[in-house]
Amino acid sequence: MAAGLCRAFGALLLSGARTPALPPCLPGGALAAARRGLCGSVPRCTTDPLWKCRVKYTVRPVGMKKTGGRDHTGRIRVRGIGGGHKRRYRMIDFQRLRYEEGAPAQPFTEKVINVRYDPCRSADIALVAGGNRKRWIIATENMQPGDIIQNSSHIGRMAVSANEGDAYPLGALPIGTLICNLESHPGKGAQYIRAAGTCGVLLRKVNGTAIVQLPSKRHMQVLETCVATVGRVSNVDHNKRVIGKAGRNRWLGKRPHTGLWHRKGGWAGRKIKPLPPMKSYVNLPRVGAQE
């Protein structure tokens, strides 16, 4: 309604006609939107963040509005973004050990209902159901509809024999296990190893912590209570896809760069750098001088 009023008032201004008074029955938000439509110098909000601020979880696709790489002031902040096919966002639950309301904190199983393509990420996603709920998760390489996956927070004396797609703490898995969807802090949700075809390796466990090798060959130290998914992320052949033509990049929402010649700087060329030091998310006690 507000958008229609804005277009009507703009047409009247361009034609030189007298602008009619706004009806008093409009709500405050619509009235402000109509007034913004009359003035072109006021920056408009090019994004609708309501789909990001949704509190209640749903498995239904949520509509998204394109930003074109612009922020709330309308200025371009990220170049190379614009256009593309319309997408809908599916809320992914990156916290595998999310218990139902009122349910005890004990291991539970879920059944894979569907594995499908997600336009908002490189990996495939899987719809799983267990108890009285459904949710989307990141699918592993060989995950198929009908599979039963296990979720547990128990760390026993012996390492478990986990199957692909199961979620366990790092302290419960044997050394050398391929993992993905790794947490940096217990209960925070997966933040690492989520791209298509990637996997990490559990190298060793030391004093309640675990050392994991990331796909970049960098080592990371986290608490052994951090949860990870066993296996490799799905859509392994994502890096082998052939774009084929410039139009396909436009379908994906990627705008071309300028055709002008640019001199290559120091970023170009081969560089041999040592691996960065191990990244630690563990607050180990420091050994200080005792007075």
Image (cartoon, rainbow, N blue to C red):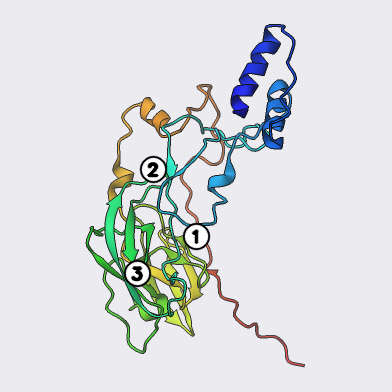
The structure residue drawn at horizontal position 33% and vertical position 45%, both measured from the top left corner, is 239
Relative to residue 116, is residue 27 depicted above or below?
Answer: above
| Disc nearer the start of the sequence (1/3) | 3
Q: Nearer the viewer, residue 15 or 66?
A: 15
Q: Which mark is residue 119?
A: 2
Classify mark 2: residues with Cα within 10 Å, few (<14), some (14-19) or many (20+).
Answer: some
The Cα–Cα distance between marks 1 and 2, rounded to whole angstroms, is: 36 Å
Residue 124 shows in this picture: yes
| Residue 25 pos. (x, y %) | 70, 31
Quadrant housing the N terminus: top right
The residue at the point 66 percent across, 37 percent down is 72
Looking at the image, tell me whether mark 2 or mark 3 is earlier in sequence order. 2
Q: Are marks 1 and 3 in contact (CB under 8 Å)?
A: no
Is residue 153 toward the left or the right of residue 46 in the image?
left
Mark 3 is surrounded, within 10 Å at the Cα level, by few (under 14), some (14 to 19) or many (20 or more) other residues, namely few
Q: Amino acid at mark 3?
A: Gly
- Residue 131, which numbered label? 3
Q: State yes or no: discs 2 and 3 in contact (Cβ < 8 Å).
A: no
User: Looking at the image, is mark 1 or mark 2 earlier in the sequence?
Assistant: 2
Q: Quadrant of residue 173?
A: bottom left
**Which residue is under mark 1?**
274
**Which secondary structure, mark 3?**
loop
Q: Is residue 278 above or below residue 204?
A: above
- Disc marking residue 264: none
Mark 1 residue type: Pro
Whole-percent x, y for residue 123 in the image: 36, 51
Determine the residue located farthest toward the top in the rendered image.
16
Closer to the camera: disc 1 or disc 2? 2
Comparing labels 1 and 3, the label whose residue is closer to the camera: 3
